[in-house]
Image: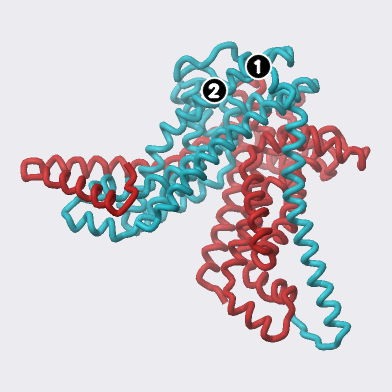
Chain colours: A cyan, B red
Amino acid sequence: MIRVESRPEWRMREYRREQLFQLVGALIVLFALTTLVVLLTTVLLDGYARLLDIKFFTNFPSRRAEEAGIKAALVGSAYLLLLTAAIAIPIGVGAAIYLEEFAKRNWFTRLVEINITNLAGVPSVIYGLLGLQVFVRTLHMDRSLLAGACTMALLALPVIITAAREGLRTVPNSLRYGSLALGATKWQTVRYTVLPVAMPSILTGVILALSRVIGETAPLLVIGAVVYIGTLPDSLFAPFTVLPVQIYNWTTRPQHAFQENAAAGIIVLLLLLLTINATAIYLRNRYQKRLPL
Amino acid sequence: MMPQSPAEVRTTYARAIVQLSSVDKRNRWRVRLEERLVRSFLFLCAVLGVVTTFAIVFILTRESLTFFKHVSLREFLTGTVWAPTFAEKSYGVLPLVTGTLLTTLIAMAVSGPVGLLTAVYLSEYASPRVRRVLKPTLEVLAGIPTVVYGYFALTFLTPLLQRFIPALEGFNALSAGIVMGIMILPTVASLSEDALYAVPNSLRHASLALGATRFQTVWGVVVPAAMSGISAAFLLGISRAVGETMIVAIAAGQQPNFTFNPLRAIETMTAYIVRITMGDTPHGSVEYQTIFAVGLLLFLITLGLNLASEFIRQRYKGARL
């Protein structure tokens, strides 16, 4: 219940409460900022020394911390990202196009939509179990790059679909009607009119969705990304490792020297994420300027 | 390419027309075929989501069934010792459940109040300048990979806390839980803020016009009106905490202790799955099948939380005051 009091001492109390809450707000801003700054500083202080050593980028993992490098992990992460993108983008954008442009509003479409919402909330480690049984065992892909990419694609799909749908929704209906009125079929409308206009914003959303793939660890541990790897993956069926798995491995070692490696790996990972996100934001800003079509 | 100006939009149209003019009678069947094929392909893409869900349920159930042939459901759900890999085997899942519950509670104790206050502050108090700092900070926090948070919990927070709490073990539920709270803070804060933002201004104005202070308006009117959205945000936060893997696998230790003491090492359901899949437990053995039984339990818990969150959101979406 709200009680409004006019007695001066009550008003004073209310005023102080107001002041107090302003202070609490400021503290919260400080909390979030401090956490972020402390986290980044810790990692930077722990890891920067290793980054100065070029061997850290050109060496394979090793038993000796000062010899160990992230070459295999970096290349593995890049391959995994590209492969995942190649699988997940066509399927994800395709599903988005179907749901936005083709699907009738019926129970089945609702079912698909509810499914996608729920899949986005399934813990990533469960996707690992799915990939382990379906791709690694049943389809005999083994603990390969392809199995990893398929698993990550399933994980990324709900996010990609949602992002792509939002991109498609930015296209004004007048463009669709124009194309349809000229006698184009639905697919021709989508292909020649809707997609070209929606592409930048779809791309932005999809890139942001894929940036999550770079940092994912748990499903890859479950399907069995290996840590000790002496060669770069040379085929889709080669074993692989990725940066977060390497970081996890180094973090869990008791020796301090390995934790320095982990910190250095984290710096590289964060820089990678920063680059990807910056690209997405750059695309978004370029696109936003063009909005008044 | 992407059209950049009205002129280019017209070019796009022109291209479409050229394409269409090639559709004379002889080609019409080809266009129809293409339309059909593309439509079917797109349909299959959309259906893949449903297939994935069914595959998850099917695989977890099938593999769990082979486990439950050896271990009774009752023993699994009520046993208090979890030791599938020991010589003397025991399959009581409760230690993993309490481990998960404990870290989740700690995480929510951090992200609940801080998330709600952040949301209230952002939506009701903050000046544009503060928003410009706080929002990107939260976004960055949301984008940091969980393995990084795990590193932070293990190498920074635990040693820091040990200075004040000497009894704190090297691996413990406390620092894993706190860091997990920081991880889900952006989720809780931004969803709660959406809920607060959706409260119509007329309510605020009415309250202020009655002479209520801003503080009274916020906590007596706006927050209660947004309560459904805020609870949905909290449920989603809990669900994410339950499913979080890397922070607990790194910092909480991997010992299934049946305890509610946050200073001790524990093991969550997620961390257990990772430990077994990384170890050398032989495939197909009962020990190995445990990961699917634990996975099924985890899936059901998070599904329940997500559905509840979604239900609350849908139910109250139309019913604004």
Looking at the rendered structure, the secondary structure element under dot 2 is helix
B104 or A251, nearer to the observer: A251
Residue B271: x, y in percent? Answer: 69, 34
Residue A212: x, y in percent? Answer: 56, 38
The answer to whether residue A28 is left or right of residue B143 is: right
Asked if residue A225 can be seen in this view, the reply is no
Residue A56: x, y in percent? Answer: 66, 18
Sort mark 2 into few (<14), some (14-19) or many (20+) by Cα contacts within 10 Å: many
- Residue located 75% across and 21% down the image: A258
Chain identity of mark 2? A
Q: Residue furthest bottom?
A: A6
Question: Which quadrant: the C terminus of chain A?
Answer: bottom left
Amino acid tagged 2 = Gly
Q: Which residue is mark 1?
A: A54
- Residue located 50% across and 30% down the image: A81
Q: Quadrant of residue A171?
A: bottom left
> Which dot marks residue A76?
2
Q: Measured along the vertical axis of the image, is residue B258 above or below residue B228? A: above
Circle nearer the N terminus (1, 2): 1
Of tags 1 and 2, which is closer to the observer? 1
User: Are the two marked residues, 1 and 2, in contact with CB atoms closer than 8 angstroms?
Assistant: no
Asked if residue A44 can be seen in this view, the reply is yes
Residue B31: x, y in percent? Answer: 16, 43
